[in-house]
Image (cartoon, grey):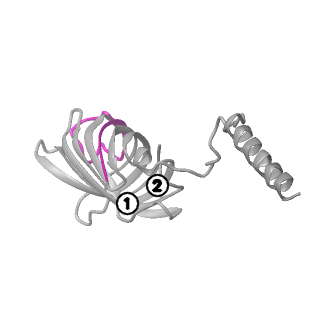
Amino acid sequence: MMKKLLLSFLFLFLAAIVNAQYRDVRLPSVPKQHSYIDYDMVDRGFWYAVDLEGASSVMSQSPNMQYANLSFTGGFRFSEFLRLGAGVGVRYYVNNADVRDTSDKFGIPIFANVRGNLLPAYEREGVPFWSLNIGGITNEGFFASPTIGYSFGGLRNNFQLGICYTITSFRNCNKNDIAYSYFGLKLGYEF
């Protein structure tokens, strides 16, 4: 009886080993990692932004001038703290006849842009950001515009709200080269 029991166990053990070797194992075609984010791919790559800006000079002794600006910027994202790019826009001046030496109300800014986040955005819905545009405006001269603001929406697709200071050089009505300063509000979308 003991022999039969031992042979039965041995037979079942060998059958289990043989069956395990010839089992057909199917793996899922798509891994079950739906929430996986490759942060290195999110941090690096091309980026684009569209900005709408409105600004006004604040002069007590001279006439004030305002402008509205729409710009498109594109570049390369090295990390969430550093993005480099170039941009072009259209600027429309209000009350420019009292200040500028031209009746043309439009200018085309062409600029280099550097920007980044001040805090990591991995686990936040919104972070503060900084930006700097440096370039020239057709038929005018040099301009620089630093911006500080708040970016909200995620890692790559963000709405941005910022306060900017712009300094622009141009020829005034008295044929002198002058610099004008503006304070403004900038709304944008970065993707």
Q: As rendered, which of 13 and 88 lies closer to the eye?
A: 13
* Residue 85 within the segment the image draws in magenta: yes
Mark toward the start of the polypeptide (1 vs 2): 1
The reply to whether discs 1 and 2 touch (Cβ–Cβ < 8 Å) is yes
Residue 140's quadrant in the figure?
top left
Quick check: 139 left or right of 116? left
Q: Position of residue 130 (x, y in %)?
A: 33, 59
Q: Amino acid at mark 1?
A: Phe
Disc number placed over residue 154 in the picture, else none: none
| C-alpha separation, residue under disc 1 versus residue under disc 2 | 9 Å
Q: Looking at the image, is 56 positioned above or below residue 99?
A: below
* Residue 121 within the segment the image draws in magenta: no
Q: Amino acid at mark 2?
A: Gln
Q: Position of residue 139 (x, y in %)?
A: 21, 33
Q: As rendered, which of 97 and 45 lies closer to the eye?
A: 45
Quick check: 153 left or right of 162? right
Q: Position of residue 62 (x, y in %)?
A: 23, 59
Residue at image mark 2? 160
The residue furthest left is 176
Q: Looking at the image, is 158 positioned above or below residue 125?
A: above
Residue depicted at x 47% and y 60%: 122
Residue depicted at x 74% and y 48%: 13
Q: Position of residue 50 (x, y in %)?
A: 44, 42
Q: As rendered, which of 9 and 125 lies closer to the eye?
A: 9
Residue depicted at x 83% and y 49%: 8
**Which residues, given as a range, are shown in magenta?**
82-106
The local crowd at label 1, few if under 14, some if 14 to 19, many if 20 or more residues have their Cα within 10 Å, is: many
Secondary structure of the residue carrying numbered label 2: strand
The local crowd at label 2, few if under 14, some if 14 to 19, many if 20 or more residues have their Cα within 10 Å, is: many
Residue at image mark 1? 129
Residue depicted at x 70% and y 34%: 22
